[in-house]
Image (cartoon, grey):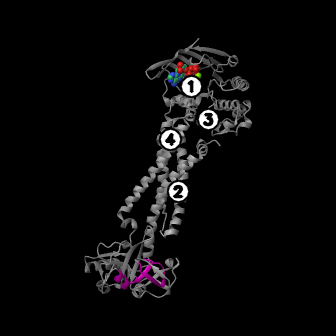
Amino acid sequence: MATILKAEDLEKVYRVGKVDVPALRGITLTVQEGEFLAVMGPSGCGKSTMLHLMGGLLTPTKGRVIIDGEDLTAASDARRTDIRRRKIGFVFQRFNLFPTLTAEGNLRLAERIHGNGADDPDRRREILSMLKLEDKMHHKPLELSGGEQQRVALARAVVNRPAIVLADEPTGNLDTESSALVLKMFRELNDRFNQTIIMITHNPEAAAACQRIIQMRDGHIV
Amino acid sequence: MDSLVISNIRQRPLRSAISVFGVALGVTLVMLFTGLSRGMSDDLQRRSANVRAEIVFTRPGSLATSTTANLSMKYVDLLKQIDGVEAAVPVIRHFYPSGPWGVDQVEGVDWDSFTRMSNIRLVQGRGPKAFDEVVIDEAKASRNHPVGSSLKLFGDKDLRVVGIYAPESGARAKLSLEAMQDFLEAPGKCSYVLVKVTNPAEQVAIARRINEKYPGNTVQLTGDFFPSIEKSIPGLAIFMRVLVALAAIVSALVVMLAMHTTITERTREIGILKAMGASRRYIISEIEREALAISFLGLLVGFALAALAGFFIHKATGLIFEFGPWWVLTAAVIGLVGGALGALYPAARAANLDPVTALAYE
Ligand SMILES: Nc1ncnc2c1ncn2[C@@H]1O[C@H](COP(=O)(O)OP(=O)(O)O)[C@@H](O)[C@H]1O
Ligand SMILES: [Mg+2]
């Protein structure tokens, strides 16, 4: 089994005015290909910060992140953006779809940004059918339920075959029923496509669906 | 529908329309002013083409666009005696204010010699004789001035239309030379003498001959004498350049403001684009495309507005607009470049946003 993600002694200190706010205090973590990992912990313990560092949206104060063999921390800003484009799919709590575009438009935009060779009609069809989105593609986000929007966001995150999906409380805005459905789809993605996933969650049931759970507290893994 | 550009423009129809209109306004201004200046000078030149003289003889300092009757009539006979000269015809040209913004002109000619030299013919009535008689061309006659009607041109003197001629040439209204001399209190004077040569191939040589014989006057070929208005009013060219620059600045500012608000409003979407791995270049080009789309619509609207305004102003005032390809191109470049430059700063700002901050934006 190949290592997809490696975080070494990650530290992050935010500077607010003249005050240093330490958010991560040395995180070391290895994620294997095909793993479905849950991250739990109280609010403010640094989960989102860790996810942003792993996705190259932030740079660490100290430590390294290596994703699919590429060192994110040593890379320039443009290079990190490029690694994000090729290797990472984000899913957010608040869906973050483009409201003026249809579901189809949101997917196409992701494909266009990803660029060359992204179009794989078979995989695309399979994903949409698995997420039960085939008849939703011409709707705009506001015409969809929360669960449907999150499924579109999930489709958008995986349509370009990212090495890893980083999900920050993807069911945090959903009712129980929708949550269960979306979680089931994360599971299926992991099962059928061997998709590597790191998912932050507060929901013990959601975490129970994962192969591995890491608990965080005060910027540490406990 | 998967174009962010088009969906953004449609998302905010009022703001898009205002931006489009802002660009259109600049384009319309450029088109109208340049079209007017070109239209008027082309009209002058077209009308001068029917004067069949090759050479114009004036006193120095006379402009084709101002009233002067400072040339002695004695030159008419003197010029006729020069080798190769077939005819010499004196003309007085007088400019007077007309309409809300316009200037119009009237000529005094010796009708018999003038028509003998040119290809101008009466289509109705007869030539002007008495001081209150005037002949007009068909364009003017068509504005409800038949033979026998009275016409007020300048001052408060009523003139009587005694004839209608064609084709158009110089001023649309012509009095007798004596009538103009009387009116301008310039007895024995004219504005210029039109000289027709026997052999047009020799016109340059004959012009030189005239110049040597009567130095101190101005001898010009007809084509040079009726210059474009741009050349005879030196400030106009500068004014037009200033106008074009202003139009560009207006376009740029309007588009800059529109893109700036768009980007502020869409901060989170820019964060999403960044999370998805969109490069700076991608984000800038996305915003520039939106700006160019708005500018392009502005161009189309601007051209339409200019054409409409030109048509109605012409109807109302008789001012002539001609939209030459060069200025159409200039206006197009102004609108597009202005828009693109205006969007550059907001686009660069968007491209430099921090993704996490942008994603947290409400
Ligand atoms: N942009 C920021 N500026 C300053 N402090 C921040 C910023 N983002 C997060 N923090 C702080 O870092 C700590 C960890 O935050 P976060 O990673 O969002 O935790 P979690 O996602 O586990 O709730 C918190 O104390 C939070 O206040
Ligand atoms: Mg969080």
The disc labelled 4 sits on which kind of residue? Answer: His
- Pinpoint residue A158: horizontal percent, then vertical percent: 65, 29
Callouts 2 and 3 on one subunit:
no
Name the residue tied to disc 1: A55
- Asked if residue B175 is among those painted magenta in the image, a careful observer would answer yes
- The three-letter code of the residue at mark 3 reads Ala
Q: Is residue A37 visible?
A: yes
Three-letter amino acid code at disc 1? Gly
In the image, taking residue B352 as reference, residue A93 lies left or right, namely: right
Q: Residues within 10 Å of mark 2 (few under 14, many from 20)?
A: many
Question: Does residue A59 appear in this view?
Answer: no
Q: Respond whether the residues carrying marks 2 and 1 are from the same subunit.
A: no
State the separation of the CA atoms marked 2 and 1. 47 Å
Q: Which residue is mark 3?
A: A110
The reply to whether the magenta stretch includes residue A123 is no
Residue at disc 1, CB closer than 8 Å to ligand 1:
no
**Magenta-highlighted residues:** B156-183
Question: In 3D space, how far apart are the residues under numbered discs 4 and 1 (Cα atoms)?
Answer: 28 Å
**Which mark is in front, 2 or 1?**
2
Q: Earlier in the sequence, mark 3 or mark 1?
A: 1
Compared with residue B204, is residue B261 higher up or lower down, i.e. above or below?
Answer: above
SS label for mark 1 = loop
Q: Residues under labels 4 and 3: Cα distance?
A: 24 Å
Q: Are marks 2 and 3 in contact (CB under 8 Å)?
A: no
The residue pinned by badge 2 equals B302
Q: Quadrant of ligand 2?
A: top right
Residue A142 picture location, percent across and down: 67, 36
Disc 4, SS:
helix
